[in-house]
Amino acid sequence: MDFIFRKQKQEARSLSDRIISWLKEHPDLSSAQVEDWLKERFPTLDVAGSTVRAYVSEIRDIYHIPKVVRIRTHEAVEELPMGQQVQVDWGETTVKNPENKEVKLYFITFVLSHSRYKYVEWLDRPFTTKDTIRCHEKAVQFFGGIPEEIVYDQDHLITVSENAGDIILTGEFQAYKQERGFRIYLCRKADPQSKGKVENVVKYVKMNFAKNRVFLNLETWNEKCLAWLKRTGNYNVHHTTKKRPVEVHALEKQHLKPVSTLLSFESNLGSSITRTVHKDKVIKYKSNRYSLPIGTYRPRGDNTVYIEIQGEELIIRTEPQGEVLAKHLLCHGKGELIKNRQHTRDRSKGIQAYKETIIRQFKDQEKAEHFIHEVGCRYPRYIRDQLQVIQYAISHFRSEIEEALAVCIKDQLWSANDLRDIAQHLTRLKQAKNPNPPSIQESRNDNPALKASAATREMDDYIKILGGVS
């Protein structure tokens, strides 16, 4: 019995120390955010919000950690019936990554006005109209239907002009509105009477989810945000309605207009559909996984690709109308992996023999050996993938590969993807000066197995590397 008591006391002390360290590191941390962090790190912990608030208040008094209070004046408005309205707004915030560098993130929020049931999605760049439409679809699926009316402020992503009440929408959003058949209401910015609910959600997302959280990558961030919605954002009792949004939504969902999962507008928008390349070099589309060539996934780069549906074929591109990365027949099942043999690793030779084969293809074999050694130190688990990308670069950009290798060693860019991208950039520079020589595309057509290529960096990145700008 004494052992159990001591163990419980140690666990309580551990929790207490952790809360104290959080408040000392982040003095502006709210008790609601402390409660969410506890639930996130200790899923089995059962503690009431009032208990956390009282304890945090006591800690602030003991350790003299003041709390900043901001007050905004509001006026009560009547509650809307179920299924009538969703409010939409955008926000942005700055967080820190593991290297303590600032990262600016952008998000869009949706909230059903009656139940206060929320959906949030993040990007590491400003939203476009196509992003906005895609997020609307994900929100509709998340809510289980679409309401009669959607409320926005006068945002340039969806509107061109109010036109004295005859609202002019952007072309893409007008097509989407006609497809889904909802009514639009535009209001002034910072207008709590019209869209105060979603403004509160923007603040809630910033202060309770994002504040003081470390950003690893966009995919993980969005996954954590969905977990936060389930655990806190849509679960905690709302201070106005005194009900849990998740429970009220179960009733409100029945009043939303059902929508199909297969949208005709997707085929119309075509290349505007985006997907994220996962670490295992696949994208997900309609509950299935489709493979991509080796080297497509970029550990520290943009992994967005664009998909297009043509009949029964799925086409994956680097840009909306850009180079084709892969083509697959559509799978109408669920949970399937659709894989192209050309996207698999070359296991016909051992790693060391593979390295030696590649090194012999360089004129400066000493530099090549040094580069491959450094690559192997940084990507031990993916060395075969890296070697295949190097071989691809040699095959496609042979005349520039030596210069690209020298640039990588000079600037300590120890990645096969960097070698390939620099070689490709040098090739494009030469083609721009002399457009007559055979194109890279013509050389690719000679070998169907080498048609796919991964997304490349922006040209400005390599102009900087090559000394084009100061």
Image (spheres, rainbow, N blue to C red):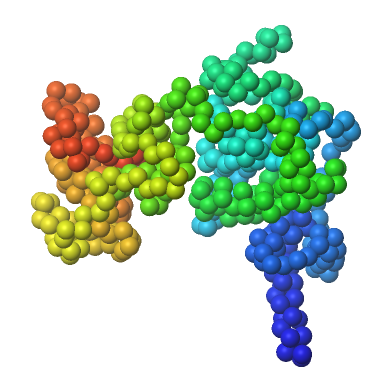
Image location of residue 377, percent across then percent down:
30, 64
Q: How many numbered circles are shown? A: 0
Q: Quadrant of the N terminus?
A: bottom right
112 sits left or right of 105 in the view: right
Residue 304 picture quarter: top left
In-front residue for pair 380/222: 222
Q: Residue at x 80, y 50 (%)?
A: 237
Residue 76 picture quarter: top right
Image location of residue 240, percent across then percent down:
85, 42
Position of residue 241 relative to residue 384, above or below, is: above
Q: Quadrant of the C terminus?
A: top left
In-front residue for pair 459/390: 390
313 sits left or right of 29 in the view: left
Farthest front residue?
Answer: 333
Residue 41 picture quarter: bottom right
Q: Residue at x 36, y 30 (%)?
A: 312
Image location of residue 206, percent across then percent down:
68, 45
230 sits left or right of 297 in the view: right
Q: Is residue 298 visible?
A: no
Q: Residue at x 69, y 41 (%)?
A: 118
Position of residue 222 relative to residue 90, above or below, is: below
Image location of residue 266, percent across then percent down:
48, 27
In-front residue for pair 395/226: 226
Q: Residue at x 59, y 18 (%)?
A: 178
Q: Is residue 72 visible?
A: yes
